Image: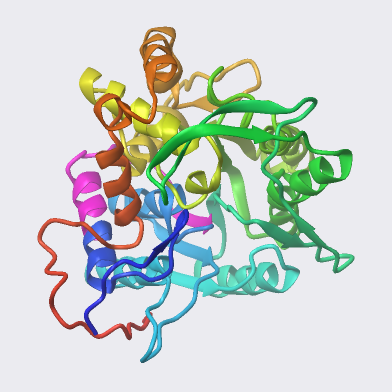
Amino acid sequence: MVIKPKVRGFICTNAHPVGCAKSVENQIAYVESQSLEQTGPKNVLVIGCSTGYGLASRITSAFGYGANTLGICFEKAPNERKTGTAGFYNTAAFHEQAQAKGLYAKSINGDAFSDEIKQQTIDLIKQDLGQIDLVIYSLASPRRTDPETGEVYKSTLKPVGSAYTTKTYDTDKDMVHEVNLEPANEDEIAQTVKVMGGEDWERWMSQLGAAGVLSENCKTTAYTYIGKELTWPIYGQATIGKAKEDLDRAAKAIMSELSSLAVQANVSSLKALVTQASSAIPVMPLYISLIYKVMKQEGTHQGCIEQIVGLFDQRLYAASPPTDDMNRYRMDGIETNEATQAKIKVLWDKVSQDNFHELSDYAGYHSDFLNLFGFAFEGVDYEVDVDPIVHWS
């Protein structure tokens, strides 16, 4: 079939297998160009491995350090009538490239929140790898089923404490307008923490530790976004922020429970980028379009793969990595520094429907959005008839 993007709101309902393979290929090429030090992970588990920062972490582990990688994802396979998800195609491409280099790469496709998938993972580690020395936690989901009670929790994107009115950009209507967001109630906050907080990360590490599949001095990190004043009302000081605060609690709990193994657990704060998750959050398409404009002018813009290579090289495997007062690794300083934020604030105050495309880099935002699903890559002929059926091997 000839595959063209089908965009609905903040999601693309199809994906291009050749374009997704190109995305993986480009990221591998960047990692291999960096000549990373040999000291790094050996056996890596990436929970949420198929897109965005999780995929970049898997690529960096394998092609930067030669690590064996086991990935957990929840993706739909293609059929004759419908393409697979981008994450499915990304994972298939990663497997192919890893195997061509003689690197171990296996993936488990299922609900990472479930104890069943955790046990399958433990069994596969015991069978193939023995022990894991790095666990990356990079899940983003709108809902989670509690494995103990069976209750389904749903996350909410709302401010906390009071209503909030701000600018936003509607990608469907190409319109800058104000959005009014009512505050979350206590139940909505609690449910968001259940889905997006640190409980599942903690559960993963606890079960891996109890099964004896974590090495001594194992490292683990969970990814977060903190942001600054412009995004705090909908991110840092909102339901998502409450959930992300719970990651800090979980990091301490993990190190306490697994102290006999000297496990090092840190939250890693990364810069804002176009992801499937960020596209759904009010304010973020407008904010990201503006930071792209400023940071590209500054020469400081980075994508997922550049951020993660920096995280591995300058934090996770650095001799004396710096942390903030909450023991987090901060890779977001290129965005959150005062000088850059001041430039963004000037644009934020000026931007309107009339000047949005002049003041922002929405073209870059939109291109990155399409890239998530394998579209808009140079060197890919999107007029060619392609087979949507791809298999993992």
- Residue at image position (53%, 25%) is 227
Quarter of the image for the N terminus: give it: bottom left
Residue 356, position in %: x, y?
33, 29
Q: Is residue 357 left or right of residue 124?
A: left
Given residues 224 and 385, the one toward you in this image is 385
Q: Magenta stretch containing residue 351, yes or no?
A: no
Residue 12, position in %: x, y?
41, 63
Q: Magenta stretch containing residue 43, yes or no?
A: yes
Residue 104, position in %: x, y?
38, 68
Residue lying at the far bottom of the rendered structure = 80
- Residue at image position (21%, 57%) is 376
Residue 179: image quadrant is top right
Work out whether residue 327 can be spotted: yes
Quarter of the image for the C terminus: give it: bottom left
Residue 354: image quadrant is top left
Q: Is residue 224 above or below residue 121?
A: above
Q: Is residue 67 above or below residue 115?
A: above
Work out whether residue 317 can be spotted: no
Q: Is residue 356 above or below residue 63?
A: above
Given residues 292 and 254, the one toward you in this image is 292
Residue 6: image quadrant is bottom left
Q: Is residue 255 left or right of residue 95?
A: right
Residue 277, position in %: x, y?
52, 49
- Residue at image position (85%, 39%) is 185
Q: Is residue 24 left or right of residue 165?
A: left
Q: Is residue 273 above or below residue 338?
A: below
Start-end of magenta stretch: 25-47
Q: Is residue 255 left or right of residue 293?
A: right
Given residues 360 and 82, the one toward you in this image is 360
Given residues 42 and 278, the one toward you in this image is 278
- Residue at image position (42%, 51%) is 172
